[in-house]
Image: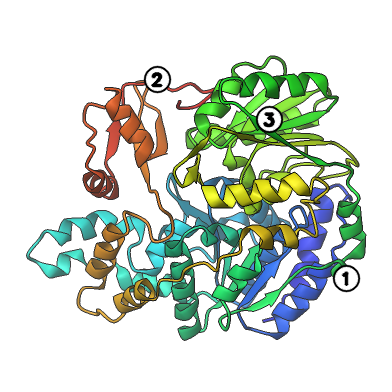
Amino acid sequence: MLFAEPYKKVEEYLIERGRGKYEERPYLDELINVLSSDSSNYLVTAPTGYGKTAISMSIALGSFNEFSKSIIAYPLRSLIEEQVDMFRKLFDFVGIGKDFVGARYMGRHESPYLIHPVTLTTIDTLSLTALGLSPEDMYSVLKGLSSEDWFKNLGHYLFSWSSVFSSSNIILDEVHSMYDTSKSLSFLVALMDLCSSTDVRLLLMTATLPRSFEQALSGRVKVRRYTRDDDPKFFDERLHKNYRVELLGLKGYNKFEIIKEILLKNEFSKALVIFNTVEDAVDFYRLLDGKKILIHSRFSVEDREAKLHELRALEDSPGKMVLVSTQAVEAGVDFSSDLIITEIAPPISLVQRFGRFLRRDEKSGRAFVWFEEDGFYNDTYKVYNADLVKRTIDFLSGNNDVNLHVGYDVFLDHVYVDPPTVDNRLINKIRNVFWDLIEPSKSALELLIKLEGSFVRDGYLVTVVTDDNVEVNVNYEYLLKLKRKGLCVECTEDKREVLLRSLRGHKFYVNIRYDKEVGLV
């Protein structure tokens, strides 16, 4: 399949969209040629801000022109919200029309069963549909699970399978999110094997690829790593961004005071302040005056989209502004700061966060990475593995000149020393779903329940409805917190029961009001 001509159209669109500011990317030019001539699975790395979305857009357009479909999957919904508009405008720009592009994830249902010629979705929704458990069928499959009539729990599994595995290309963007757990990595391996059996090309893209993770996929994918030789101009421009990473150990009781003091004492145009929990982000945001915006995962779908539009407007306006966020900012939010103050996180996350720092023409800035000295608890630091965080602190304490835009492989390999675990038993269970031709949906559902509601992540999302009738997606741990505070009478502490009710489409009513400015706290 040839993508050179579609890529030219994508470049024309990006030039018009950027009002002539689009810069050529030699590395992408080469990738397009490679992907056109070789139908193998590829794992591609490119720095944050390099524009690898152009690859996804070119493949989607090229596949459409040859009467094939493409699925582009992202780890988080917030990424899709940014990308759908771009894909649709591209298809309008080339005269095809935006209606051929659809999105499907929790809260957005434009492409049921991922049927659009170009569908943008989440890894979660892709995993469900690939195993015959399309969200559209979940209720009937669950209902049939307790019925003596076996045929009632089939759903439309053959349609789901064919929708996924009749695609010519499946693209997993920001695939580093699947390195986090053995479960997600094992599903990725199983998906690669299934795609190989059905002649679907899989393209994986990321800005961060530790050598230990590359080894886990050995033999299933060709790896194309970005190096300076691929684009010396871009590499050197990013390499010469002028900053040092200042590592700070703070106490929980005065961290906000110190972070606010950093904001007051430093000159900046746009500042980015990142916390590892929603509660910390909200509490700090409330302490700030002036032009500010808050982004995290517990906003309604409508308000999350509104926040991104507001961010565009604030970024283009004169004067100082502060963006306060959680890990949600890592998910492709197109923002550039000249002051970054971020809580510690493993390198994969830090590189993504620094992708929102000196992202454009800025030449220099200040960068602070802080950690809460009393934030370690057993084997965790907030939401992260404690060992990974400690190795990150160890590296940064002796390498404050590390560049987190390009050339950071040594940092990645220093922290991610242990090869990730691939669960071959889980891979076999996923494969076996396709051999159970009598009740495959039941087999897939039982496996999903055993994996606590997701094939690819540790937690799962439930929907709550607030006193003022706003729907927000939250995780089980947050629901449990509301239950223990007496703010959710109908909630149960039985994790399996919460899972089953959520899968049936149940929404939990909570006695708390929603705040459009700070979300659900």
Q: Quadrant of the C terminus?
A: top left
Q: What's the mark number on residue 323?
A: 3
Q: Position of residue 154 (x, y in %)?
A: 23, 68
Q: Amino acid type of disc 3?
A: Leu
Give the total number of marks visible in the rendering.
3
Q: Nearer the viewer, mark 2 or mark 3?
A: 3
* Mark 3 to mark 1 CA distance (whole Å): 35 Å
Name the secondary structure under disc 2: loop
Counting residues from the N terminus, which is met first, the one under dot 2 or under dot 3?
A: 3
Asked if the residue under mark 1 is in contact with the one under mark 3, i.e. CB atoms within 8 Å, the reply is: no
Q: Nearer the viewer, mark 3 or mark 1?
A: 1
Name the secondary structure under disc 1: helix
Q: Amino acid type of disc 1?
A: Asp
| Residue 14 horizontal side relative to residue 507, left or right | right
Q: Position of residue 249 (x, y in %)?
A: 66, 33
Q: Bin the neighbour count of mark 2 within 10 Å (Cα to Cα): few under 14, some 14-19, many 20 and up.
A: some
Image quadrant of residue 468? top left
Q: Position of residue 492 (x, y in %)?
A: 22, 36
Q: Position of residue 455 (x, y in %)?
A: 39, 61
Q: Amino acid type of disc 2?
A: Arg
Q: What's the mark number on residue 229?
A: 1
Between 11 and 428, the one lying in front of the other is 428
Q: Quadrant of the N terminus?
A: bottom right
Q: What's the mark number on residue 513?
A: 2
Picture layout, residue 365 above or below residue 66:
above
Residue at image coords 55%, 35%: 296
Asked if the residue under mark 1 is in contact with the one under mark 2, i.e. CB atoms within 8 Å, the reply is: no
| Residue 87 horizontal side relative to residue 365, left or right | left
Residue at image coords 26%, 45%: 495
Picture layout, residue 456 above or below residue 264:
below
